[in-house]
Amino acid sequence: MTSLHTFGAGVGGEAETRIRFLAKSTEDPLAQDGPNVIRNLAKSPKRISSVYVYDKRGTELFEQQCNTPEYYLRRAETQLLRSHGGEIVKRCGFIPLVELGAGTAEKTRILLAEYENHGLRCDYFPIEVDTETLSETACKLAAEFPHLHVHCLGTTFQKGLPALPACPERRLFLFLGGSIGNFELPEIDDLLLELFCNSSPGDYLLLGADLDKDPAIVNRAYNDSAGYGPRSTLNMLSHLNRRYAGNFVMNHFRYRSHYNRPAKRNEVRIESLVDQTVTLAGLGFKVSFGESELIDAEVMWKFDPDVLGAILDRAGFSMVHRWIEPIYRYGLYLLRRR
């Protein structure tokens, strides 16, 4: 294992001894992703993987979006966790936590507090592609919760799950924030298969998922008046510029978001405002965009609750209980791996 100092972050005193980055996840999680970038931009329609939202700046913008009046997802999920978090942790038995896409772990603190309130050690394994945010989050959590041990995996879900150390007891996997809706359906199946293969019978999964609702509510959430959602998505271009020596010009593109009600998904695209050619010098790659051409950037499924339950059941996860927030129709699912 590797200490937190390796990543340019640190927290003083005893808390630092309770933070580790697992050795298999110390490299840049996107270091080998260049061929995928080229492949996606060569498609028709062109695509940029949503993983490029989450560098440090993108995470900051997303956190600001989550705090806007229009963005209901975090509020609804937080309300469910505050109402049922104690019940969930006690039902599962104060076991190690593994979180996919931990981010700043704002909502996870509700569960971590349950361990702390009982004076119990908690081993927490956050998986997060934005390693800078992960380091900062680990420092804050270790300082806040004296019984917490943080085992960081700064990588993608696909690399992080196989890198988890063997565990002799059950674990509770967390996949919150509606993030399961940010994948295409075949990718959801693949991710659930990865989770099944890297978990054990009896492990729990706590899943947050957004549900189908009034399109006006969805449209407001992804077109917030402060503009954090659009800026978070457009930050993908800045991330590509920085990582691959690109020359995307920000004001030559704009954000487009639309809720496709028949498909039950919100579709986010980036529109090219002019005919232009962009070079990613670090990849030795040039790509041309026509005026009004759309780039697929993000998708946010709004599930039928029973359909999602069937997807999870097929993947090998049996329903223990589900809670649905009635105003904004957001679901929290507790499942058990068969």
Image: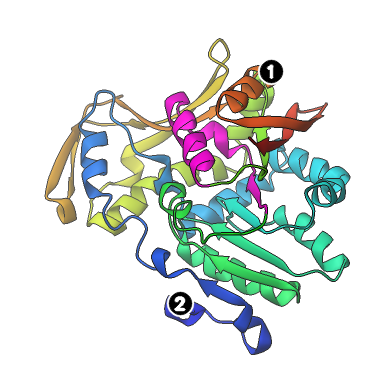
Q: Residue at x 76, y 77 (%)?
A: 146
Packing grade of label 2 (10 A; few <14, some 14-19, many >=20) is some
Q: Is residue 123 above or below residue 53?
A: below
The answer to whether residue 302 of the structure is visible from this angle is no
Q: Which mark is residue 306?
A: 1
The residue singled out by tag 2 in the image is: 2
In the image shown, does 241 or 336 lie closer to the viewer? 336
Residue 173: say if magenta.
Answer: yes
Q: CA distance from mark 1 to mark 2?
A: 43 Å
Q: Is residue 317 above or below residue 302?
A: below
Q: Residue at x 46, y 75 (%)?
A: 1
Q: Position of residue 332 (x, y in %)?
A: 73, 35
188 relative position to 295: left or right: right
Residue at the extreme top of the image, as rendered: 262
Which structural element holds mark 1?
helix
Three-letter code, disc 1: Asp
The answer to whether residue 8 of the structure is visible from this angle is yes
Q: Residue at x 58, y 55 (%)?
A: 103
Q: Position of residue 281 (x, y in %)?
A: 15, 54
In the image shown, does 241 or 253 lie closer to the viewer? 241
Residue at the extreme bottom of the image, as rendered: 13
Residue at the extreme left of the image, as rendered: 284
Packing grade of label 1 (10 A; few <14, some 14-19, many >=20) is few
Q: Position of residue 271 (x, y in %)?
A: 35, 30
In the image shown, does 320 or 281 lie closer to the viewer? 320
Three-letter code, disc 2: Thr
Q: Is residue 140 above or below residue 156?
A: below
Tell me the colour scheme of the image.
Answer: rainbow
Magenta stretch bounds: 170-198
Residue 71: say if magenta.
Answer: no
Mark 1 / mark 2, whichever is N-terminal: 2
